Image: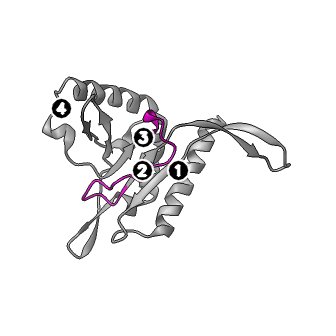
Amino acid sequence: MPFFMETVAQALKRHPVLNATWDKDAIVYKKEINLSVAIATDDALFVPVVHHADELNVNGFARKLHELADKTRSNTLSNTDMAGGTFTINNTGSFGSIQSVPIINHPQAAILSVESIVKRPIVQKDDSIAIRSMVNLCLSIDHRVLDGLAAGRFLQDVKHELESFSHE
């Protein structure tokens, strides 16, 4: 999850309309990138916030995610931990899901669900077949703030960055 979080935070810098909200009759662009992240307990779902997410690397996200998970499960989240999110990322893959339709965390403009990473047969450029680890990324958007073109470009950017991780 920290790899996905870092990739999304950096992509939000390049695609600021996904880090915006709709307020009355105008789009409001948020200066800070604050990733809301869904964390489940045995009987509830909480969505604490990683503030200034664009300033963290994978290790920073791993530490912050561990801290927020501990606070969530020990019922010690503060109001500050829960406030100020500008974009939500959700790991429905931890439940075995391969495709979902996430609900936007109002007033945010978008939410991304990371599904299960599964092995699939893939036809290569030379028409050979290889087994590759694949993941579906499911994005829901508020069309008052952005359209499918902006969403598609964001997902293309995220995909490209995730693929570059796998080749490093």
Is there a contact, CB below 8 Å, between mark 2 and mark 1? yes
95 left or right, relative to 85: right
Q: Which mark is residue 92?
A: 3
- Residue for badge 4: 77
Q: Residues within 10 Å of mark 4 (few under 14, many from 20)?
A: some
Q: At 33% from the left edge and 30% from the top edge, which residue is drawn?
A: 64
| Mark 3 element type | helix
| Mark 4 element type | loop
Return the x and y of residue 29 as percentages of the image width and height. 30, 63
- Residue for badge 2: 112
167 left or right, relative to 56: right
**Upstream in sequence: badge 2 or badge 3:** 3
Mark 2 or mark 3, whichever is nearer to me: 3
Q: Is residue 101 inside the magenta stretch?
A: yes
**Upstream in sequence: badge 2 or badge 1:** 2
- Could you tell me how far apart the alpha carbons at marks 2 and 3 are, in whole angstroms? 10 Å
- The answer to whether residue 1 of the structure is visible from this angle is no
- Could you tell me how far apart the alpha carbons at marks 1 and 4 are, in whole angstroms? 29 Å
62 left or right, relative to 126: left
- Could you tell me how far apart the alpha carbons at marks 3 and 1 are, in whole angstroms? 18 Å
Is there a contact, CB below 8 Å, between mark 1 and mark 4? no
Query: Which residue type carries mark 3?
Result: Thr
**Upstream in sequence: badge 1 or badge 4:** 4
Q: Which residues are magenta?
A: 92-110
Query: Which residue type carries mark 1?
Result: Val
Return the x and y of residue 49 as percentages of the image width and height. 27, 41
- The part of the image, by quadrant, that contains residue 108 is bottom left
Q: Residues within 10 Å of mark 1 (few under 14, many from 20)?
A: many
- Could you tell me how far apart the alpha carbons at marks 2 and 1 are, in whole angstroms? 11 Å
The foreground one among 120 and 166 is 120
